[in-house]
Image (spheres, helix red, strand yellow):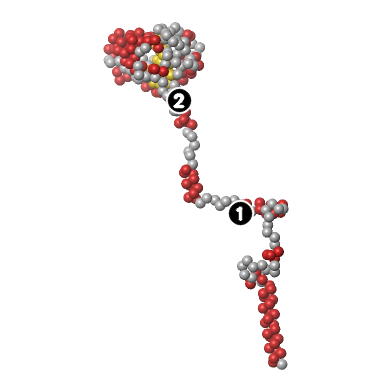
Amino acid sequence: MFCRLALLLCLGMILDGCSSSTANPSESAPSGTAVDGAAEAAPEPVVGSSPSQDAAVEAAPDQMMPPPLPPGDAASSAETAPPPPDAATDSAQPVGPVLTYKDFTCSWVLGITTTGEWYRAGFENVVDNARWQVTPIEMGHLEKWADPNNPIWNSAIQSPCTMNSKTPDRIVYTAVKYEWTTVDQFLPAYIAVINNIKTKYPSVKRVDLMTYERAPGDMECAGANRPLDSWIRPVQDQAAAMTAAMFPGFVFILPKWEVKSCADFGLCPHLSGAANTLEAKTIGEYFLAN
Protein backbone atom coordinates (compact mmCIF):
# COMPACT_ATOMS: atom_id res chain seq x y z
CA MET A 1 0.00 0.00 0.00
CA PHE A 2 2.80 2.40 0.93
CA CYS A 3 4.65 1.63 -2.31
CA ARG A 4 1.57 2.30 -4.42
CA LEU A 5 1.08 5.73 -2.75
CA ALA A 6 4.70 6.71 -3.37
CA LEU A 7 4.42 5.67 -7.03
CA LEU A 8 1.33 7.86 -7.53
CA LEU A 9 3.10 10.91 -6.01
CA CYS A 10 6.09 10.48 -8.30
CA LEU A 11 3.86 10.16 -11.33
CA GLY A 12 2.02 13.41 -10.42
CA MET A 13 5.24 15.37 -10.10
CA ILE A 14 6.36 14.18 -13.55
CA LEU A 15 3.05 15.24 -15.13
CA ASP A 16 3.23 18.76 -13.53
CA GLY A 17 6.71 19.32 -14.96
CA CYS A 18 5.66 18.30 -18.45
CA SER A 19 2.61 20.61 -18.48
CA SER A 20 4.73 23.63 -17.35
CA SER A 21 7.23 23.02 -20.16
CA THR A 22 4.45 22.80 -22.77
CA ALA A 23 2.68 26.02 -21.64
CA ASN A 24 5.87 28.26 -22.01
CA PRO A 25 7.95 26.78 -24.80
CA SER A 26 9.66 30.14 -25.60
CA GLU A 27 11.02 30.50 -22.08
CA SER A 28 12.78 27.17 -22.19
CA ALA A 29 13.91 27.35 -25.82
CA PRO A 30 17.39 28.77 -26.45
CA SER A 31 17.77 31.98 -28.55
CA GLY A 32 17.53 31.30 -32.29
CA THR A 33 16.07 27.81 -31.81
CA ALA A 34 12.91 26.90 -33.73
CA VAL A 35 9.89 26.18 -31.59
CA ASP A 36 7.59 23.42 -32.81
CA GLY A 37 9.18 23.83 -36.27
CA ALA A 38 7.47 27.28 -36.79
CA ALA A 39 10.71 29.17 -37.58
CA GLU A 40 11.83 26.52 -40.02
CA ALA A 41 8.46 26.60 -41.80
CA ALA A 42 8.36 30.46 -42.23
CA PRO A 43 9.67 31.49 -45.69
CA GLU A 44 12.15 34.39 -46.03
CA PRO A 45 10.38 37.67 -47.00
CA VAL A 46 10.88 38.92 -50.57
CA VAL A 47 10.49 42.69 -50.98
CA GLY A 48 7.93 43.55 -53.62
CA SER A 49 6.67 40.05 -53.94
CA SER A 50 3.16 41.05 -52.92
CA PRO A 51 1.11 44.20 -52.14
CA SER A 52 0.84 43.20 -48.50
CA GLN A 53 4.60 42.97 -48.17
CA ASP A 54 5.07 46.40 -49.93
CA ALA A 55 2.59 47.96 -47.53
CA ALA A 56 4.46 46.49 -44.60
CA VAL A 57 7.71 48.05 -45.86
CA GLU A 58 6.06 51.46 -46.38
CA ALA A 59 4.54 51.29 -42.90
CA ALA A 60 8.03 51.25 -41.38
CA PRO A 61 9.83 54.19 -43.09
CA ASP A 62 12.23 54.66 -40.19
CA GLN A 63 13.85 51.37 -41.04
CA MET A 64 14.51 52.54 -44.64
CA MET A 65 15.96 56.01 -43.83
CA PRO A 66 19.63 56.59 -42.94
CA PRO A 67 20.24 57.70 -39.38
CA PRO A 68 20.37 61.51 -38.80
CA LEU A 69 23.71 63.26 -38.50
CA PRO A 70 24.92 63.93 -34.98
CA PRO A 71 24.62 67.59 -33.92
CA GLY A 72 28.34 68.19 -34.34
CA ASP A 73 28.36 66.97 -37.96
CA ALA A 74 25.34 69.09 -38.84
CA ALA A 75 27.00 72.20 -37.47
CA SER A 76 30.23 71.57 -39.33
CA SER A 77 28.28 70.98 -42.54
CA ALA A 78 26.56 74.35 -42.16
CA GLU A 79 29.87 76.05 -41.49
CA THR A 80 31.46 74.70 -44.66
CA ALA A 81 28.52 75.61 -46.90
CA PRO A 82 29.35 78.62 -49.16
CA PRO A 83 27.55 81.86 -48.24
CA PRO A 84 24.87 83.18 -50.63
CA PRO A 85 26.04 85.86 -53.09
CA ASP A 86 25.56 89.45 -52.02
CA ALA A 87 23.79 91.08 -54.94
CA ALA A 88 24.15 94.54 -53.47
CA THR A 89 27.93 94.21 -53.12
CA ASP A 90 28.32 92.71 -56.59
CA SER A 91 26.39 95.47 -58.19
CA ALA A 92 28.61 98.08 -56.56
CA GLN A 93 31.78 96.79 -58.20
CA PRO A 94 33.16 98.59 -61.30
CA VAL A 95 32.65 96.76 -64.59
CA GLY A 96 35.95 96.17 -66.33
CA PRO A 97 39.14 98.26 -66.08
CA VAL A 98 38.97 102.00 -65.41
CA LEU A 99 39.43 103.88 -68.69
CA THR A 100 41.84 106.84 -68.83
CA TYR A 101 42.82 109.57 -71.30
CA LYS A 102 44.60 107.19 -73.68
CA ASP A 103 41.41 105.17 -74.17
CA PHE A 104 39.32 108.06 -75.55
CA THR A 105 39.20 109.56 -79.04
CA CYS A 106 36.88 112.45 -78.10
CA SER A 107 36.25 114.00 -74.68
CA TRP A 108 33.45 116.59 -74.49
CA VAL A 109 33.30 119.23 -71.75
CA LEU A 110 29.79 120.48 -70.93
CA GLY A 111 29.25 123.42 -68.60
CA ILE A 112 28.47 127.08 -68.05
CA THR A 113 30.18 130.25 -69.23
CA THR A 114 33.00 129.98 -66.69
CA THR A 115 33.76 126.50 -68.05
CA GLY A 116 34.56 127.99 -71.42
CA GLU A 117 36.69 130.68 -69.80
CA TRP A 118 39.27 128.35 -68.26
CA TYR A 119 39.03 126.01 -71.27
CA ARG A 120 40.06 128.79 -73.65
CA ALA A 121 42.77 130.04 -71.24
CA GLY A 122 45.22 127.33 -72.34
CA PHE A 123 43.60 123.98 -71.48
CA GLU A 124 44.00 122.61 -75.02
CA ASN A 125 47.67 123.59 -74.97
CA VAL A 126 48.18 121.08 -72.17
CA VAL A 127 46.05 118.18 -73.41
CA ASP A 128 45.81 116.74 -76.93
CA ASN A 129 43.45 119.32 -78.42
CA ALA A 130 42.53 116.96 -81.27
CA ARG A 131 40.75 114.80 -78.67
CA TRP A 132 38.90 117.53 -76.76
CA GLN A 133 35.91 119.79 -77.38
CA VAL A 134 33.72 122.07 -75.26
CA THR A 135 30.16 123.40 -75.03
CA PRO A 136 29.84 126.22 -72.48
CA ILE A 137 26.30 127.57 -72.03
CA GLU A 138 25.31 130.84 -70.40
CA MET A 139 23.07 129.87 -67.45
CA GLY A 140 23.48 126.22 -68.47
CA HIS A 141 22.30 125.02 -65.09
CA LEU A 142 21.68 121.51 -63.86
CA GLU A 143 17.92 121.37 -64.31
CA LYS A 144 18.27 122.13 -68.03
CA TRP A 145 20.66 119.25 -68.67
CA ALA A 146 18.35 117.03 -66.60
CA ASP A 147 15.54 117.67 -69.13
CA PRO A 148 15.98 115.35 -72.13
CA ASN A 149 13.88 117.67 -74.31
CA ASN A 150 15.65 120.91 -73.44
CA PRO A 151 17.26 122.63 -76.49
CA ILE A 152 20.49 122.81 -74.51
CA TRP A 153 21.32 119.35 -75.83
CA ASN A 154 21.47 120.81 -79.36
CA SER A 155 23.97 123.54 -78.49
CA ALA A 156 26.97 124.13 -80.73
CA ILE A 157 30.31 122.47 -80.07
CA GLN A 158 33.43 124.63 -79.87
CA SER A 159 36.82 123.37 -81.03
CA PRO A 160 35.40 119.97 -82.03
CA CYS A 161 37.41 116.77 -81.85
CA THR A 162 39.04 115.71 -85.11
CA MET A 163 37.45 112.27 -84.70
CA ASN A 164 34.02 111.22 -83.40
CA SER A 165 32.91 114.72 -82.43
CA LYS A 166 29.23 113.71 -82.62
CA THR A 167 29.86 110.37 -80.94
CA PRO A 168 32.13 111.23 -78.00
CA ASP A 169 33.37 108.46 -75.74
CA ARG A 170 33.90 110.66 -72.67
CA ILE A 171 31.91 113.56 -71.18
CA VAL A 172 33.12 115.96 -68.50
CA TYR A 173 30.07 117.63 -67.00
CA THR A 174 30.11 120.75 -64.83
CA ALA A 175 26.95 120.82 -62.71
CA VAL A 176 25.78 124.21 -61.43
CA LYS A 177 22.72 125.21 -59.40
CA TYR A 178 23.25 128.03 -56.94
CA GLU A 179 19.82 128.03 -55.30
CA TRP A 180 19.43 124.38 -54.31
CA THR A 181 20.20 123.48 -50.72
CA THR A 182 19.31 119.77 -50.30
CA VAL A 183 20.43 116.40 -51.60
CA ASP A 184 16.82 115.68 -52.57
CA GLN A 185 17.02 118.54 -55.06
CA PHE A 186 20.39 117.68 -56.53
CA LEU A 187 20.29 113.89 -56.68
CA PRO A 188 17.35 113.32 -59.08
CA ALA A 189 18.76 115.93 -61.46
CA TYR A 190 22.22 114.32 -61.44
CA ILE A 191 20.70 110.92 -62.17
CA ALA A 192 18.60 112.37 -64.98
CA VAL A 193 21.68 113.92 -66.60
CA ILE A 194 23.52 110.60 -66.54
CA ASN A 195 20.54 108.77 -68.03
CA ASN A 196 20.22 111.43 -70.74
CA ILE A 197 23.87 110.98 -71.64
CA LYS A 198 23.47 107.20 -71.80
CA THR A 199 20.41 107.55 -74.04
CA LYS A 200 21.61 110.34 -76.33
CA TYR A 201 25.26 109.27 -76.55
CA PRO A 202 25.55 105.49 -76.15
CA SER A 203 29.14 105.83 -77.39
CA VAL A 204 30.14 107.40 -74.05
CA LYS A 205 32.23 105.08 -71.88
CA ARG A 206 32.91 107.43 -68.96
CA VAL A 207 31.37 110.52 -67.36
CA ASP A 208 33.36 112.83 -65.06
CA LEU A 209 31.43 115.13 -62.71
CA MET A 210 32.97 118.42 -61.67
CA THR A 211 32.00 121.83 -60.29
CA TYR A 212 33.29 125.31 -60.97
CA GLU A 213 36.41 126.41 -59.08
CA ARG A 214 35.52 127.05 -55.46
CA ALA A 215 36.82 129.42 -52.82
CA PRO A 216 39.79 128.38 -50.64
CA GLY A 217 38.67 125.70 -48.19
CA ASP A 218 35.26 125.86 -49.88
CA MET A 219 34.36 128.70 -47.54
CA GLU A 220 32.28 131.57 -48.86
CA CYS A 221 34.33 134.62 -49.86
CA ALA A 222 32.33 137.13 -47.86
CA GLY A 223 33.89 140.19 -49.48
CA ALA A 224 33.63 138.94 -53.06
CA ASN A 225 31.21 140.16 -55.69
CA ARG A 226 28.19 137.80 -55.44
CA PRO A 227 29.73 135.75 -52.60
CA LEU A 228 27.00 133.07 -52.50
CA ASP A 229 28.36 131.82 -55.83
CA SER A 230 31.95 131.50 -54.59
CA TRP A 231 31.59 128.09 -52.96
CA ILE A 232 29.95 124.66 -53.48
CA ARG A 233 27.48 123.40 -50.91
CA PRO A 234 28.30 120.05 -49.29
CA VAL A 235 24.89 118.68 -50.30
CA GLN A 236 25.88 119.02 -53.95
CA ASP A 237 29.13 117.12 -53.39
CA GLN A 238 27.16 114.48 -51.51
CA ALA A 239 24.61 114.07 -54.31
CA ALA A 240 27.38 113.79 -56.90
CA ALA A 241 29.10 111.07 -54.87
CA MET A 242 25.82 109.18 -54.52
CA THR A 243 25.32 109.37 -58.28
CA ALA A 244 28.79 107.97 -58.94
CA ALA A 245 28.03 105.10 -56.56
CA MET A 246 24.90 104.29 -58.58
CA PHE A 247 26.91 104.04 -61.82
CA PRO A 248 30.14 102.28 -60.80
CA GLY A 249 32.85 102.19 -63.42
CA PHE A 250 30.94 104.75 -65.52
CA VAL A 251 30.61 107.93 -63.41
CA PHE A 252 33.59 109.46 -61.58
CA ILE A 253 34.10 112.50 -59.34
CA LEU A 254 36.82 114.97 -60.32
CA PRO A 255 38.98 116.80 -57.77
CA LYS A 256 37.45 119.76 -55.94
CA TRP A 257 39.64 122.45 -57.50
CA GLU A 258 39.99 125.71 -55.56
CA VAL A 259 41.31 129.16 -56.36
CA LYS A 260 44.35 130.42 -54.46
CA SER A 261 42.51 133.31 -52.83
CA CYS A 262 39.22 135.16 -52.92
CA ALA A 263 40.98 137.85 -54.96
CA ASP A 264 40.99 135.39 -57.89
CA PHE A 265 37.25 135.95 -58.32
CA GLY A 266 35.71 138.70 -60.39
CA LEU A 267 31.93 138.32 -60.43
CA CYS A 268 31.65 134.93 -58.72
CA PRO A 269 32.11 132.28 -59.94
CA HIS A 270 33.98 133.97 -62.84
CA LEU A 271 37.76 134.15 -62.41
CA SER A 272 40.36 136.70 -63.32
CA GLY A 273 42.56 136.09 -66.36
CA ALA A 274 45.55 134.85 -64.40
CA ALA A 275 43.42 132.52 -62.28
CA ASN A 276 41.84 131.03 -65.41
CA THR A 277 45.27 130.38 -66.88
CA LEU A 278 46.35 128.59 -63.72
CA GLU A 279 43.13 126.53 -63.63
CA ALA A 280 43.53 125.55 -67.28
CA LYS A 281 47.01 124.22 -66.54
CA THR A 282 45.94 122.43 -63.34
CA ILE A 283 42.92 120.75 -64.91
CA GLY A 284 44.81 119.91 -68.10
CA GLU A 285 47.61 118.19 -66.19
CA TYR A 286 45.03 116.11 -64.35
CA PHE A 287 43.59 114.86 -67.63
CA LEU A 288 47.02 113.96 -68.93
CA ALA A 289 47.02 111.15 -66.36
CA ASN A 290 43.32 110.30 -66.05
Residue placed most toward the observer, 9 or 28:
28
The residue located at (33%, 10%) in the rendering is: 125
Residue 229 in the figure: left or right of residue 22: left
Of residues 249 and 154, the one drawn nearer to the viewer in this rendering: 249
List the single residue furthest toward the bottom.
1
Look at the numbered discs 2 and 1 and tell me whether their residues touch, using CB distance below 8 Å: no
Q: CA distance from mark 2 to mark 1?
A: 54 Å
Residue ID for mark 2 = 95
Of the residues under marks 2 and 1, which one precedes in the sequence? Answer: 1
Would you place residue 157 above or below residue 86 in this image? above
Compared with 114, 88 (above or below) is below
Residue 179 lies, in percent from the top left, at 40, 15
Q: Secondary structure at mark 1?
A: helix
Task: Answer with the quarter of the image where residue 134 lies.
Answer: top left
Amino acid type of disc 1?
A: Gln
Q: Type of residue at label 2?
A: Val
| Residue position marked by numbered label 1 in the rendering | 63
Q: Which mark is residue 92?
A: none
Tag 2, which secondary structure?
A: loop
Residue 178 visible somewhere in the drawing: yes
Horizontal and vertical percent position of residue 84: 49, 37
Q: Residue at x 64, y 53 (%)?
A: 60
Residue 228 visible? no
